[in-house]
Image (cartoon, helix red, strand yellow):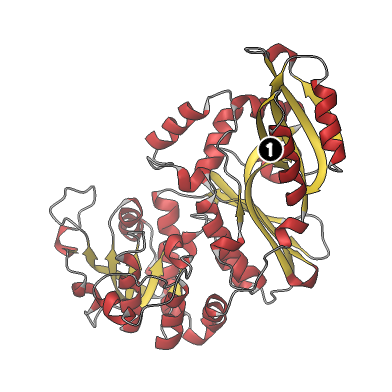
Amino acid sequence: MYQKVNVGMFGLGTVGVGVINYLRQFYDSSKTGLEIHVSKICVRDPAKIRDVNVQRHLTKNPDDILEDPTINVVVEVMGGIEPAGPYIMRALSNGKHVVTANKSLLTHYDDSEMQQRAGELIRQGKWPKGYGGWHAFLAALSNKTNIAFEASVCGEIPVIEVVSAMPSRREIRALEGIINGTSNYLLTRMSQGIAYETALKEAQGKGFAESDPSLDVDGIDAAQKLAILSTLIFGNRIELPQIMCDSMKGITTQDVRYAQEFGYVIKPIAKAVRHEGNLLELRVAPTLLPKSDNLSFVNSERNAVSLYFKGRDEPLTLEGLGAGRMPTARSVVADIVRVVTSPHESRYWIYNLFTCSPQDYSGLMQMLVSPYYLRLDVDDKPGVLGNVGTIIGANGVNIEEVRQMQNEKKDGSIPMVLLVGPANELTIIKMIDELQNQSYVKEILKIRRKPK
């Protein structure tokens, strides 16, 4: 006989349906020792026609799950802060394990004083203003329950499992990855000559992008994932304001082509590096990668995470689908098994990491340097190149390569593309401000660049 596990699930969208189908088609009790039953599913509209037969398990009353003593595990795949957050808190408080894919909640950070009525608001299905996502980990710690969240980061790639299994937090020196499939899809299609607007419509049609793609293209989605991974890897709680984000808005198919002419590929890169004094560099930005870089070959909606270890140059790279019904469902089901079979004490270290006070890295980003790609649309007249070079040189920045795209003159202006050497954030901002104040400069785009 296998141990019976009753699951209550909140949400029956793409991932929720995937979980049901995975359990029915692929799950193997003889391998895990658990007999998993989804006994109740809380949805907004039980009468809605769905492409999976679960009608007898549907309810619209969250108490049917949260107050049912026979339910062992709550799976939250509805997303958002409310009411998902309060449901998670109540589940943990009632002694139920939780599995969630909700990176927005887990990385939600304190932004004001916590209200004294927090408990009452949570019971009402509201998330108290100023309550950070770390309170979910505190609830797991306090109530001796487990919370697992592999599906919140990189879909089917078991990166949380891999880093959690490592017996040291001092071994990894850096993480670099493509952890947002939407941005990667857009840049891949743009490398094939497809305009950004057309690529975005394709991504929306395939379900890779939301109607408002800002979370993806502005780097927020990747920053949420990076905050979770960096916390686990480096042993300090990371909050979103500590991560610098550069948007991919403004990048054109011409920029992608120019980068290729210089021997680079533009990819949406999330990066975390441990520097001297245990200081962390944390950023999400479209980046020019050398064509030889291992991440330059990761295309379309695929994700990849490279872990760099002390004492070796070649990284350990994990690659797979970053989203999708069945890939994400596989991670959710694996987490159901994990929360039931893992002793609560074995996950103390995770809960402690996410509930400790975050360190202050303010000022560090301004000290760190990066080489850049610059594209300036300038007046097509004599002396402009020399003037641009003078301003860049006066700021102590070295020009490594420069090209004026003679075949792309338009309305009296010409693209000037430069690869400049390493400079810190403050220097680059000051230099670009000076260039933008010149009457002959129409537009400037800067993109970070990884040296060859």
Rendered-image quadrant of the C terminus: top right
Foreground pick, 213 / 265: 213
Q: Is residue 264 left or right of residue 330?
A: right
Residue that appears at 81% across and 56% down: 313
Structural crowding at the residue carrying mark 1, measured as other residues with C-alpha within 10 Å and reported as few (<14), some (14–19) or many (≥20)? many
Tell me: residue 410, above or below residue 138.
Answer: above
Label 1: which secondary element? strand
User: Viewer-proximal residue, 42 or 360?
Assistant: 360
* Residue 273 x, y percent position in the rendering: 72, 61
In the displayed structure, would residue 152 be above or below residue 250? below
Q: Could you tell me residue 280's position as x and y percent?
A: 70, 65
Query: Which residue position holds label 1?
Result: 446
- Give the residue at the far left of this rendering: 47
User: Which quarter of the figure has residue 400?
Assistant: top right
Q: Is residue 3 visible?
A: no
- x and y percentages locating residue 408 in the rendered image: 68, 14
* Location of residue 24 by image quarter: bottom left
**Amino acid type indicated by mark 1:** Lys
- In the picture, measured across the screen, residue 81 lies left or right of residue 59, that is right
Could you tell me residue 118's position as x and y percent?
33, 79
